[in-house]
Amino acid sequence: MLLVLPQLLDDEEVAQARAILATAPWADGRASAGPQAAQVKNNEQLPADCEAARSVGALVLRALDRSSRFLAAALPRKVFPPRINRYSGGANFYGRHVDSAVRFTEGGVRVRTDISCTVFLSDPAQYDAGELAIHEAGSTRQVKLPAGHAVLYSGTHVHEVTPVTRGTRLAAFFWIESMVRGDSQRRLLHELDLAITGLRERHGESDTTVALAGTYHNLLRMWAET
C-alpha cells in the first residue's frame, strides 16, 4: 500500500523546520547505514542526538498524533524517532536498497519496520529530480510531493532516491511498527474503514454501519499485536 498524507505539516511547521535545519550540523549519511545500504548511500543526515534532529522530529511526531488518516492506515504500535536527511551538491542520491527489518532506537527499543514514511520538507520547485522511487513487482512508482506532505509505503519494497541535479532536497524519514504486521491485512482494514466512513457520511449511522464496524474491530482483534 502506498498512501499520501497531504499537509501532514502545515506551512508554519514547514517554515519552522527549515529555519532549524538552516544551521544544523549535517554529517555523512553513511554513518547510520547498514553494510549493504552504505555502498549506495550518498547523502547527508543529522546526528540522531543533536538538538535540530530532535526538534524537527518532535514536530513530525506531533503531526502524526493529530492525523486520523495516518492512524487509520498505519495502525501504529511503535514509531521510530524521525531522522532528517539532505541531498544536494556532491551528496545527492541513495541507490536501490531495502531497509533493515528491525531498527534500534537510541534507547535500545526494537522497532520492526513494517511501514516506511518520508515527510517532504522542500518544495518540488526547489530542486530537480530527487524522486523517491519505490520498486514493486514489475513497476516503479516515483514520488515527489509538496513540502509538508508525507508518503507511507511498505517497508518490504526496494526503493531509492534519484540523484538531485539542482538545489537541495530536505526530508524527514522514519519507520512504523504496525499492530497489524501484514501489508495486505492493513490494506483491507483501511479500505473497510474508508467504506464505513463513507456510508456514515452519506446515510448516517445505521444497523449496517454498526455491523460493519463490528466486523472491522473483530478483524483487528484477530490480527492485531499490542
Image (tube, helix red, strand yellow):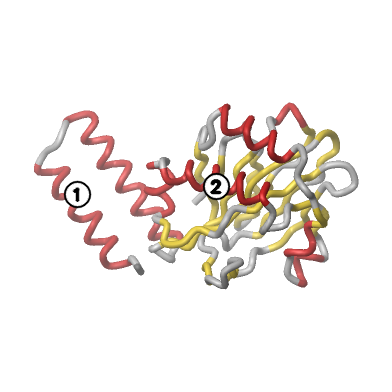
- Outermost front residue: 51
**Alpha carbon separation for disc pair 1 and 2:** 36 Å
Left or right position of 199 against 5: left
Quarter of the rendering containing residue 36: bottom right
**Residue 214 percent coordinates (x, y):** 18, 54
Given residues 49 and 116, the one toward you in this image is 49
Q: Residue at x 63, y 45 (%)?
A: 141
Q: Residue at x 68, y 30 (%)?
A: 123
Specify the quadrant that holds the C terminus. bottom left
Left or right position of 6 against 166: left
Q: Which residue is mark 1?
A: 212
Question: Crowdedness of circle 2 by 10 Å Cα count: few (<14), some, many (20+)?
Answer: some
Determine whether the residue tagged by mark 2 lies in a helix, strand or loop: helix
**Residue 178 percent coordinates (x, y):** 43, 61
Determine whether the residue tagged by mark 1 lies in a helix, strand or loop: helix
Q: Which residue is mark 2?
A: 58
**Residue 57 percent coordinates (x, y):** 59, 48
Q: Residue at x 65, y 49 (%)?
A: 140
Left or right position of 66 against 132: left
Given residues 34 and 194, the one toward you in this image is 34
Q: Please tell me how many numbered marks the rendered image carries.
A: 2
**Residue 127 percent coordinates (x, y):** 78, 33
- Specify the amino acid type for callout 2: Ala
Which numbered dot is residue 102? none
- Outermost left residue: 207
- Specify the amino acid type for callout 1: Leu
